[in-house]
Image: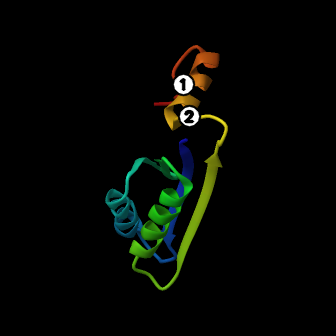
Amino acid sequence: MTVVALLSVAPVIEGSMSGEVAKAVDALEAFDVRYETNPMGTVIEADDVGTLFTAAQAAHEAVDADRVSTVLKIDDKRAEAGRAHEKVDAVEEHLGRPARGGE
Protein backbone atom coordinates (compact mmCIF):
# COMPACT_ATOMS: atom_id res chain seq x y z
CA MET A 1 0.00 0.00 0.00
CA THR A 2 1.18 3.53 -0.70
CA VAL A 3 -0.15 6.53 1.18
CA VAL A 4 0.10 9.87 -0.64
CA ALA A 5 -0.22 13.22 1.10
CA LEU A 6 0.17 16.92 0.53
CA LEU A 7 2.00 18.56 3.42
CA SER A 8 2.32 22.29 3.92
CA VAL A 9 4.33 23.50 6.91
CA ALA A 10 5.03 27.20 7.38
CA PRO A 11 5.94 29.52 10.21
CA VAL A 12 3.56 32.39 10.83
CA ILE A 13 6.14 35.18 10.52
CA GLU A 14 6.83 38.40 8.66
CA GLY A 15 9.16 38.15 5.67
CA SER A 16 10.55 35.11 3.94
CA MET A 17 9.54 31.69 5.21
CA SER A 18 11.89 29.74 2.93
CA GLY A 19 14.57 29.04 5.53
CA GLU A 20 12.10 27.52 7.96
CA VAL A 21 10.28 25.64 5.19
CA ALA A 22 13.66 24.18 4.18
CA LYS A 23 14.05 22.85 7.73
CA ALA A 24 10.68 21.11 7.46
CA VAL A 25 11.60 19.55 4.11
CA ASP A 26 15.01 18.50 5.40
CA ALA A 27 13.39 16.71 8.35
CA LEU A 28 11.74 14.29 5.90
CA GLU A 29 15.17 12.86 5.01
CA ALA A 30 15.20 10.90 8.28
CA PHE A 31 12.21 8.81 7.19
CA ASP A 32 11.51 6.14 4.59
CA VAL A 33 9.38 8.43 2.43
CA ARG A 34 9.56 9.77 -1.10
CA TYR A 35 8.79 13.46 -1.51
CA GLU A 36 8.69 16.30 -3.99
CA THR A 37 8.39 19.94 -3.01
CA ASN A 38 6.39 22.38 -5.10
CA PRO A 39 5.36 26.03 -4.59
CA MET A 40 2.29 25.08 -2.53
CA GLY A 41 3.67 22.28 -0.36
CA THR A 42 5.37 18.91 -0.46
CA VAL A 43 3.86 15.71 -1.82
CA ILE A 44 4.91 12.77 0.35
CA GLU A 45 4.58 9.05 -0.32
CA ALA A 46 5.02 6.41 2.37
CA ASP A 47 4.36 2.69 2.56
CA ASP A 48 2.06 3.14 5.56
CA VAL A 49 0.11 5.87 7.27
CA GLY A 50 2.12 5.62 10.50
CA THR A 51 5.35 6.50 8.73
CA LEU A 52 3.60 9.35 6.97
CA PHE A 53 2.24 10.82 10.22
CA THR A 54 5.62 10.50 11.94
CA ALA A 55 7.41 12.23 9.05
CA ALA A 56 4.79 15.01 8.97
CA GLN A 57 5.16 15.53 12.72
CA ALA A 58 8.94 15.79 12.38
CA ALA A 59 8.55 18.36 9.60
CA HIS A 60 6.16 20.38 11.76
CA GLU A 61 8.48 20.26 14.77
CA ALA A 62 11.53 21.23 12.68
CA VAL A 63 10.15 24.74 12.10
CA ASP A 64 11.54 27.19 14.65
CA ALA A 65 8.80 29.74 15.20
CA ASP A 66 6.37 30.80 17.91
CA ARG A 67 3.51 29.83 15.62
CA VAL A 68 3.48 27.15 12.91
CA SER A 69 0.71 26.42 10.42
CA THR A 70 0.56 22.85 9.10
CA VAL A 71 -1.90 21.37 6.63
CA LEU A 72 -1.88 17.64 5.85
CA LYS A 73 -4.15 16.14 3.20
CA ILE A 74 -3.95 12.33 2.94
CA ASP A 75 -5.03 9.91 0.21
CA ASP A 76 -4.96 6.48 1.86
CA LYS A 77 -6.09 4.19 -0.95
CA ARG A 78 -6.36 0.93 0.94
CA ALA A 79 -7.69 -1.45 -1.72
CA GLU A 80 -4.77 -1.05 -4.12
CA ALA A 81 -1.30 0.41 -4.31
CA GLY A 82 -0.67 3.54 -6.31
CA ARG A 83 2.11 6.08 -6.56
CA ALA A 84 1.73 9.86 -6.82
CA HIS A 85 3.24 9.97 -10.32
CA GLU A 86 0.57 7.51 -11.51
CA LYS A 87 -2.11 10.07 -10.65
CA VAL A 88 -0.35 12.66 -12.79
CA ASP A 89 0.24 10.11 -15.56
CA ALA A 90 -3.50 9.33 -15.68
CA VAL A 91 -4.40 13.02 -16.08
CA GLU A 92 -1.74 13.47 -18.76
CA GLU A 93 -3.13 10.46 -20.63
CA HIS A 94 -6.53 12.18 -20.81
CA LEU A 95 -4.92 15.47 -21.81
CA GLY A 96 -2.70 13.87 -24.42
CA ARG A 97 0.15 16.10 -23.23
CA PRO A 98 2.13 17.00 -20.10
CA ALA A 99 0.04 18.60 -17.35
CA ARG A 100 2.02 21.85 -17.42
CA GLY A 101 1.42 25.16 -19.07
CA GLY A 102 2.50 28.76 -19.16
CA GLU A 103 6.18 28.03 -18.79
Q: Secondary structure at mark 2?
A: loop
Q: Can you name the residue that lies furthest to the top here?
A: 96
Which image quarter is the C terminus in?
Answer: top left
Residue drawn 52% across the image and 37% down it: 84
Q: Is residue 79 above or below residue 37?
A: above
Residue drawn 32% across the image and 61% down it: 30
Q: Amino acid at mark 1?
A: Asp
Question: What number of labels is visible?
Answer: 2
The foreground one among 52 and 88 is 52
Q: Is residue 44 above or below residue 24?
A: above
Quarter of the rendering containing residue 69:
bottom right
Residue 23 in percent (x, y) is at 35, 67
Q: How is the image coloured?
A: rainbow
Q: Amino acid at mark 2?
A: Gly
Residue 17 in percent (x, y) is at 42, 68
Q: Earlier in the sequence, mark 1 or mark 2?
A: 2
Within 10 Å of disc 2 (Cα), the crowding (few <14, some 14-19, many 20+) is some
- Closer mark to the observer between disc 1 and disc 2: 2
Q: Is residue 64 above or below residue 43?
A: below
Q: Which residue is mark 2?
A: 82
Which image quarter is the N terminus in?
Answer: top right
Q: What numbered label is drawn on residue 89? A: 1
Q: Can you name the residue that lies furthest to the bottom here?
A: 66
Residue drawn 51% across the image and 35% down it: 83
Q: CA distance from mark 1 to mark 2?
A: 11 Å
The foreground one among 23 and 12 is 23
